[in-house]
Amino acid sequence: MVARLVIAAPSSGAGKTTVATGLMAAFAGRGLAVSPHKVGPDYIDPGYHALATGRPGRNLDAFMCGTELVAPLFARGAHGCDLAVVEGVMGLYDGAADRGELASTAQVAKLLRAPVVLVVDASSQSRSVAALVHGFASWDPEVRIGGVILNKVATDRHEHLLREALGESGVPVMGVLRRAPAVSTPSRHLGLVPVAERHADAVDAVRAQAEQVREGCDLEALLALARSAPPLRAEAWSAGAALLGAGAGAVSGAGAVSGAGAVSGAGAVSGAGAEVPGPGAGRGAAGRGERPVVAVAGGAAFTFSYAEHAELLTAAGAEVVAFDPLRDEKLPEGTRGLVIGGGFPEVYAPELSANESLRDAVSALARSGAPVAAECAGLLYLARSLDGRPMCGVLDADARMSQRLTLGYRDAVAVSDSPLAAAGTRLRGHEFHRTVIEPGAGATPAWGLRQPERRVEGFVRGGVHASYLHTHWAALPEVPLRFVEHCRR
């Protein structure tokens, strides 16, 4: 039994992150062990969740990981906790395009048998709020909306009108929040600014969010709702068990996927809450022979990661060591493999370019044939240039910022053999960027994508696998086995 709540909204922009993070921090401040979760592929919100709770934020993505892994991944994070708070994505019933409810907050709430609290932006309505809440509560009888939190309420009079309208809806009001600039979090071209880039200000914002929630929400009622969730039968996911199930398929080339987990410092909690072991960590369940050092890029420029990636690499027998391309002038001692995940290299292009000694070290490692897994930000860093500034030059391609947002889930197939995937491997991933790279694919592309249009994408060259596609390694744990085996070779 884990008390649990899903924080959802009718649409994006209603205040889910503010409310969810505030609730996490408020309950943690009362001495509860709070497990933070985020529906969908988002990397940034879990960083704020980790700041609020002191625990790794974990994503629950039914598209990339499959519906069968949602409850086990949830149970992994919630083990030993008093309460789990799950922040939704987009509107409650919005999911993967043209896939029905797949990957929606509603689907995840049903998979977790969790009550939903609907956060409503009430800034431009009064009595109509009752019709809106009634519609969302009655749309899917399997989704239990147990309460409403009214956000951006203007005055006492406005609050009275809203409460009066909702009085006969059957959905209780569990909180009323006024407009409060102190709780806002700055955004830019891909959403919120990550915690790693504004840590002191982020701490202040989370503290303000917790105070706002304490003052405006009925925490006892919300906790009682969370505790009303029925038992959830799910065996907690573990990296060791996942790798044992994967067996030797990664070594022989069966079903591997790409990906990269970025971290913010050795032994630290990353932007998405991945705890990265430092040197000397114990051998993983799948480890044999030497423990090759896998260097994982972090720092302010590379904040995108899933907690499970570092856990899987460690369980596969690697020694995971973090480094910061903005600060470190060389790769960690003994590096045999390199993972460069997502983030914002376009924001830090001058600083990354100025660190010539590290760029040379990355280029030399790639030329040696060592496995290099790069996705999105990592792809840009390996390019010849980014916005006209020299990068690592591993790829014969140039990247630049664009006005166009590329966003969405992708069905993909590996076009070429690599240290990550055997040709023909099928997987699901996610794209999210406002940059372009030219050419978009090398002579040996990484992936063939099926939607929104058919195209090849990415680069495979020697041991390098570089692509825009974000993936979640828990979906196919063969990848760390395959990657670490290539590092040993």
Image (spheres, rainbow, N blue to C red):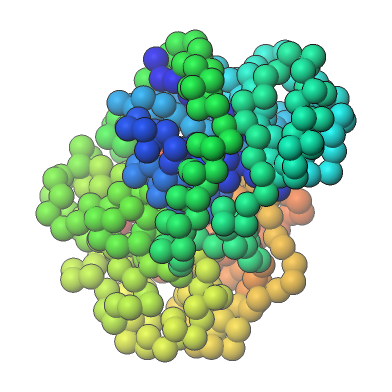
Direction from residue 486 to residue 343 in the image, left or right: right
Relative depth, front residue between 65 and 466:
65
From the top left corner, tell me how far across and down residue 446 is, in percent: 55, 60
The answer to whether residue 179 of the structure is visible from this angle is yes
Give the quarter of the figure containing the C terminus.
bottom left
- Asked if 259 appears above or below 189 in the picture, the reply is above
When the figure is inspected, residue 248 is found, relative to residue 79, above or below; the finding is below
Looking at the image, residue 210 sits to the left or right of residue 438; the answer is: left
Q: Is residue 12 above or below residue 224?
A: below
For this orientation, the residue located farthest to the front is 156
Residue 185 in picture, x, y percent from top left: 57, 58
Q: Nearer the viewer, residue 102 or 459?
A: 102
In the rendered view, does 326 fall on the left or right side of 95? left
Up the image or down, 478 lies above or below 193; here it is above
The image quadrant of residue 101 is top right
Q: Measuring 62% from the left and 26% from the top, which residue is drawn there?
A: 174
> Which one is nearer the viewer's eye here, 251 or 262?
262
Residue in view at x 70 percent, y 74 percent: 402
At a point 31% along the width and 37% down the height, the residue shown is: 239
Q: Quadrant of residue 2?
A: top left
The residue positioned 39% from the left and 15% from the top of the image is 1
Q: Position of residue 231 (x, y in %)?
A: 45, 11
Lateral position of residue 45 relative to residue 356, left or right:
right
